[in-house]
Image: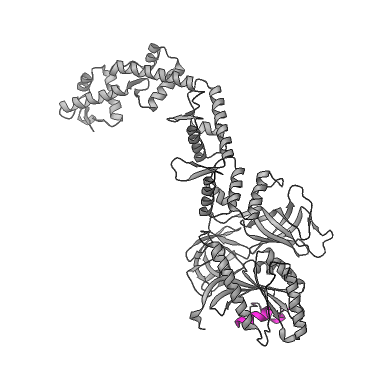
Amino acid sequence: MTACELVECPVVVGTAGHVDHGKSALIEALTGKNPDRLEVERRRGMTTELGFGELALPSGKLVGLVDVPGHAHYLRAMVQGATGVDVALLVVSAVEGVMPQTREHVHVLELLGVTHMVVALTMRDLADDEIAALAGLDVEAFLEGTVFAGASVVPVSSKTGEGLGELLAVLDDAVCSCLSERLEATAGSGDTPRLPIDRCFSIRGTGTVVTGTLHDGPVSVGDELVALPSRTHCRVRGMQVHGDTQRAVPGQRVALNLVGDGVAHLKRGEMLGVEGCVGQTLRFLMRLTYVGHDGARSGVLASGTRVHVMAGTAEVLGRIMLLDDEPPLAVGETRVVQVRLERPLPLRAGDHAVILSHSPISLLGGGRVLLSRCRRSRDLSAGERALLGALDAGDRAAAVAAWLGLQRLPVPAAAAARALDLSGAEAAALLHGAVSLGDAVALHVERSTEELYAVPAVLDAALAALSDALAAMHGAAPKQTGFTPGEVAHAAWPTAGEDVASALVLEGCARGICSQEASEVFDPHSAAAAIRVVREASQRIVAALDEAGLGAATLPEVGEQLQLDRDAMTRALRELSLNRAIVKIERDVALSAAAEAHAREVVAAAIEAAGGAATTSVLREALGVSRKRAISILEHLDAVRFTTLDKEAGGLRSLR
C-alpha cells in the first residue's frame, strides 16, 4: 500500500488499560513509532502523558491515535485523552488479565459515551495457552456487564508480531461501523466547531500550535475562533490532519497554527469555538452514574460532595447537588443531579463529564450533560421535570415543547437554540414541528422575518396580562383615548423586548383584546366613550376650520366657539395632527388640510402670473387675508419647501 492510497478518516482510536500491560509497545508495533514523547517516559518505560499518532488500517483508512497513561496516579491524563476517543483499544495482559486500572478505564470509557471497543490480549508470547485462555475468559466476563459486551478479543504479541494483522483487521471493522454511525448522526447538523485543547506548544518560525480532537462542526484555515474560559480571540493560520490541509471535519485529530493576542498562553483545558456559538457554565444538570471509589466509608454519594469535574480536556472543582432532597446515591445508581462549579467550564448539552473524588483522586462516576445551564434551585417544578425527562430520553421535540412551557413570554428560535444547545436550523425545525402539532403558536414580528414561539397557555397568560393592563390604565385615565405601545408593554410585560411586545399587541388586536390606531393602543371597550368624544370634537374642529378657510381663528378661540374643554381640545388636536387633517402654521393657528391645499393653489397661480416670482404684497392680495396671516401662510409654505424666498432679490418668492 502506498501513501497516496491512504484516506483520512474522521475517527480516533484510543488505548486504555492497566499500567505495564504494553499499550505503548503495542502502538509502536502497529505504527513503527513510540508514542511516548517525553524522555523520562522512555527511560522509565511508563507513560505519564498523552501520546498522539496515526494508524494506517488495511482498508486504507488513516485514523488518529491517542495513547493514555495506565497508572492510577495519571487518571486525569487518561480521562483527558479518552474524551475524544471513538473506538477504544483495550489492552489487557495475557499474563495478568483484568486489573484495577483495566476496570477503571473501562468505566471511564462508558461514562464518556464510547460504544466501540476492540480488546488486545497482549504479551501472548509470555503466557502459555491455558493462561492466555483464562485471561481471555476473564476479559469477556468483565465486559459482559458493560456496553462493550461481545467485543472482539485478539491475542497479540508486540515482540513477535503474532496477531497484529488480525488486530488491525478487527480495528478496521470497528472504525467502519463507528464511521457509519457518525455520518448518520451528524448529517445536516449545521453545528459550529469545538476543539478541546489537549496540547499547546510553540514551533520556531511557525508560532503557537494547539492540538485536539475536533467536535460538532468543520474548521477551515482563516476561521476566527475564541478560546474559553480565557476569551482569547485568534485566527487559524494553518492546519494539519496527518499533513497540511485547508479543512478538518469532526472526529479528526487536528493541529491548528493560531495567531492572535494571547495565543501563546493557551493551555490544555481551553475550548476553541466560534464566538457566540460556544459557551461556558457554572451550573449544569447531568445524568450521573455513581460507580463508587476505594476508601469510601459510607459507600454512598451525598449531596454537597466536593469533586473534580472533567469535561473535554478541562478540569474544574465543583459540588454534586442532589435534587428535591433526594437520598444519597448508592453505588451503581444513576440519577439526574445538579453540578455547581467553582470556575466556568466550557460545556454543552450532550457532552459527557467524568467525576473524580476530591482527594485522593479516584473515579466516582460520570455521565451525559442534559442541560448546560440551569437555575441554582434544586427544587424542580413539574415543567422542569418534564424537560429533563425529554432530554434524558433524547426526545428533542418534546424537550423543545417542555422548555417553551417554562417561558413566561414568546421567544425566538435563537433563544431555544441557546438554552438547549441546538443548532439554529435544528431549533427552527423543531419549533415549526411543534406549531404544526398544535403544541406551540408562532407569532409574526413587525419589520422582521423572524417568528416568536410560545405554548398556547403562555400566550393566553400574556394576552390576559395585556387585557388587565389596559383595563387598569383606562380606569386610571378615563379621558385618555389610548397609550403608547411602550407604556402598554411596561404595564403588561415589564421584561419584554420591543419585538416581543409588538408581536403580542398584534396578536391582541387579532383577538379583539385591543386596538391600535396611529401610535396608540387601547381597549376598544374601555376606551369607547373617550374615543367617541375625541372623534366628535375632531369632526367639529375640522368643520369649523373648513368653514373659516384661510382666515381661521386661533385654536383657543375655536375651542371657545365650539365649547370644548381643554382636555378634549388637546386630544382632538393631537389626533388631527397625527392624521394630517389639520396643518399648524403657527403655535396656536391651524388650517384645515383643505384650506392649506387651497393656499398652495392660490400662491402657485399668483407666482406664475407674476412671471415666476412674486412679492409678499402680491401674494397677500391673492390670498385675501391680513398681512400677518399671509406672512404665516407664506412662511409655512417656505418651511415645507413649497416656495423659496430670495431676500437678495427684494423678497421675491418663487416655486421650488
Place of residue 39 in the rendered image (x, y in percent of width and height, measured from the top left):
67, 79
Q: Is residue 618 above or below residue 312?
A: above
| Residue nearest the viewer, comparing 344 with 468 | 468
Task: State how the image is colored.
Answer: one colour
Total marks in image: 0
Q: Is residue 26 magenta?
A: yes
Q: Is residue 632 above or below residue 84?
A: above
Q: Residue 392 appears in which quarter of the rendering?
A: bottom right
Q: Residue 558 appears in which quarter of the rendering?
A: top left
Tell me: 201 left or right of 333.
left
Residue ranking furthest to the bottom: 160
The magenta segment is 20-46
Tell me: 130 left or right of 599.
right
Q: Residue 584 appears in which quarter of the rendering?
A: top left
Q: Quadrant of the C terminus?
A: top left
| Residue nearest the viewer, comparing 287 with 398 | 398
Q: Please tell me which residue is depicted at 59% across the width and 47% down the height of the picture.
A: 401
Q: Is residue 540 magenta?
A: no
| Residue nearest the viewer, comparing 646 with 108 | 108
On the question of residue 514 being in view, the answer is yes
Q: Please tell me which residue is depicted at 59% across the width and 61% down the height of the picture.
A: 271
Place of residue 120 in the rendered image (x, y in percent of width and height, measured from the top left):
68, 78
Place of residue 524 in the rendered image (x, y in percent of width and height, measured from the top left):
49, 25
Place of residue 502 in the rendered image (x, y in percent of width and height, measured from the top left):
49, 37
